[in-house]
Image: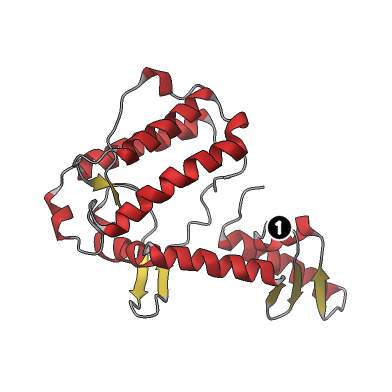
């Protein structure tokens, strides 16, 4: 099941509240994990949802609280929140890729707390990370990304963006080290299920991360990467 956008979740909550009220109940306690997923997008193995006329209360155990804190720590280390807020606040209107309008953006450098209020795209079709996408969707995304990369390739405006670290910074060297460590571990766990063409793409990424020569700058997801476009007929997606 694809993750539902916030508008869809709100409609589900309202429908359930109407059913609760029609039966004269004060609240409903949901313990079935498929129903928890339907109401919250939570995909873990332990959770309870309590829904009443005013609020939806989500309960889970400390494992997920710890995991969330670890994820936030990783995001702080690599400045994900700071860069995403700055992207939408400072340059989001200048990029050609279609995306949500930024209604408000704020980030506290000291605490790393942030607020990013974006246009609701609840009427759009949501992707599913577990089931993947169709060949048509993949080609559409690739065409959009190619245009986006070309637009920002060696763009002089990149020199004015001080919230993105340079390739030779310690910050990015740490990311290179993580890729080199993570790729073999990923292969150990999932390598037997990877198609050969996908494995070759991963190997290309590992090889590129090991290169030290200066490469061109361009925009990529959430920040700048020293990633070069490659043309390899063996890596073309198959319909």
- Left of 5 or right of it: where is 103? left
For the residue carrying disc 1, how many other residues have a C-alpha within 10 Å: few (<14), some (14-19), or many (20+)? some
Which residue is nearer to you in this view: 153 or 143?
153
The image quarter in which residue 88 lies: bottom left
Q: Position of residue 183 (x, y in %)?
A: 48, 41
Q: Residue 134, relative to residue 152: is it above or below?
A: above
In the rendered image of this protein, does residue 118 appear above or below residue 34?
below
Identify the coloring. Answer: secondary structure
Residue 174 position in % (x across, y down) = 35, 55
Question: Residue at 82% of width from left, 81% of height from top?
Answer: 26
Q: Which residue is under mark 1?
A: 38
Q: Is residue 154 left or right of residue 118?
A: left
Seen as rendered, the residue at the extreme left is: 156
Residue at point 37%, 18% (across, down): 233
Outermost residue toward the top in this view: 233
At x 26%, y 51%, the residue is 95
Q: Does residue 122 appear anywhere in the picture?
A: yes
Q: Residue at x 14, y 56 (%)?
A: 159
Q: How many marks?
A: 1
Residue 50 lies in what quarter of the image? bottom right
**Observer-nearest of 218 and 191:** 191
The picture places residue 74, in percent across and down from the top left corner, at 46, 63
The residue lying toward the viewer, choosing from 21 and 197, is: 197
- Can residue 222 be seen here? no
Q: Secondary structure at mark 1?
A: helix
- Of 152 and 78, nearer the camera is 78
Residue 107: x and y in percent read 35, 74
């Amino acid at each position: 099941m694809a993750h539902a956008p916030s508008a869809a979740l709100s409609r589900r909550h309202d429908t359930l509240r109407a059913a609760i009220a029609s039966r004269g109940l004060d609240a409903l306690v949901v313990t079935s994990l498929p129903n928890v997923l339907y109401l919250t997008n939570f995909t873990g193995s332990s959770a309870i949802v309590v829904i009443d006329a005013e609020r939806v209360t989500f309960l889970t155990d400390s494992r997920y609280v710890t995991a969330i804190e670890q994820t936030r720590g990783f995001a702080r280390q690599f400045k994900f929140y700071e860069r995403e807020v700055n992207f939408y606040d400072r340059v989001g209107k200048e990029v050609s890729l279609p995306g949500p309008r930024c209604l408000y953006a704020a980030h506290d450098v000291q605490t790393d707390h942030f607020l990013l209020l974006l246009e609701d795209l609840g009427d759009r079709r949501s992707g599913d990370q577990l089931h993947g996408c169709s060949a048509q969707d993949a080609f559409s995304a690739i065409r959009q990304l190619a245009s986006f990369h070309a637009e920002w390739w060696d763009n002089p405006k990149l020199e004015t963006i001080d919230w993105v670290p340079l390739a030779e910074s310690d910050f990015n060297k740490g990311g290179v080290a993580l890729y080199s460590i993570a790729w073999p571990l990923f292969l150990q766990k999932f390598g037997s299920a990877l198609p050969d063409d996908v494995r070759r793409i991963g190997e290309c990424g590992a090889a590129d991360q090991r290169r030290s020569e200066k490469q061109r700058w361009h925009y990529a997801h959430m920040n700048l990467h020293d990633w070069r476009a490659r043309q390899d007929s063996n890596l073309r997606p198959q319909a």
